[in-house]
Image: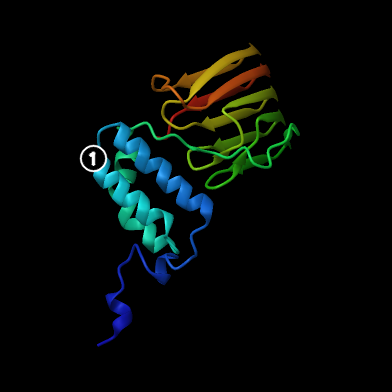
Amino acid sequence: MDASNLEPTDVGPAAGGDVPATRADREHATVLLNAACAEGYLSGAERDRRVAAAQVASTFDDLVPLTRDLLDIRSAGLATVPPTIDSAGATDDVDSIVNIFSGTTREGRWRVRRRISMLACFGGTTLDTRDAVFEAQTIDVNVFMLFGGLDLTVPVGCDVQDSVGAIFGGVDRKLAAPAPGMPVFNLHGFVAFGGVSVHNPK
């Protein structure tokens, strides 16, 4: 019998499950477990059992059974899951994104700096922060869009404050109610013949 045919499709080397889990990965799983307990999806005892296992996880396969059911809750928008906030190494340097007749996409595991500046002229930017690591609780985003746009995905429960000026454009926000302890995005700047779309994961 060919043993390779017996490997599950969502774990093991074929799915990248043998990749070593980093400290940030273990912390991300712990945050998810704590949030699920706070929302009533896990008992305290079950949370403690899973957190203890997460802290000694060596690969992604070790983390999968601890969080699989909770990720389904998260994707359905039924629970507010705080993202990872790691201020170690954070600076006041501005994360500058410039798109002129071009575009930028950031998604998956990336670091969200406390200050982001975006310039788009006949171009656009897509930022998906649902799995990102935040360097601060408050994120300041300054935009200048001329015939350009920004598509910003934020975790459920994040608050977004908008003070963007616009001519033949604007900011479209489709967000769940803000939740305590979640990051806050402050949007500033100017948009002309373009727009900013802010929403939770679809």
Quick one: quadrant of the N terminus?
A: bottom left
Q: Nearer the viewer, residue 30 or 160?
A: 30
> Could you tell me which secondary element the residue under label 1 belongs to?
loop
Residue 3 found in image quarter: bottom left
Q: Nearer the viewer, residue 151 or 88?
A: 88
Q: Position of residue 115 (x, y in %)?
A: 68, 29
Report if residue 130 is visible in the image: yes
The residue drawn where x is 41% and y is 65% is 15
Q: Where is residue 12 in the image (x, y as percent from the top left)?
A: 38, 69
Image height of 85 relative to 146, above or below: below
Quick one: quadrant of the C terminus?
A: top left
Image height of 154 relative to 173, above or below: below
Q: Name the residue under label 1.
A: 43
Which residue in the rendered view is the most extreme toward the bottom? 1
Q: Position of residue 132 (x, y in %)?
A: 54, 41
Residue 92 found in image quarter: top right
Q: Is residue 129 left or right of residue 116?
A: left
The residue drawn where x is 36% and y is 49% is 51
| Amino acid on which disc 1 is placed | Ser
Q: How crowded is mark 1: few (under 14 residues within 10 Å), some or many (20 or more)?
A: few
Q: Is residue 104 left or right of residue 180?
A: right
Report if residue 192 is visible in the image: no
Count of numbered badges drawn on the protein: 1
Q: Which colour scheme is used?
A: rainbow
Q: Where is residue 19 in the image (x, y as percent from the top left)?
A: 48, 65
The residue drawn where x is 26% and y is 40% is 44
Image height of 162 relative to 20, above or below: above
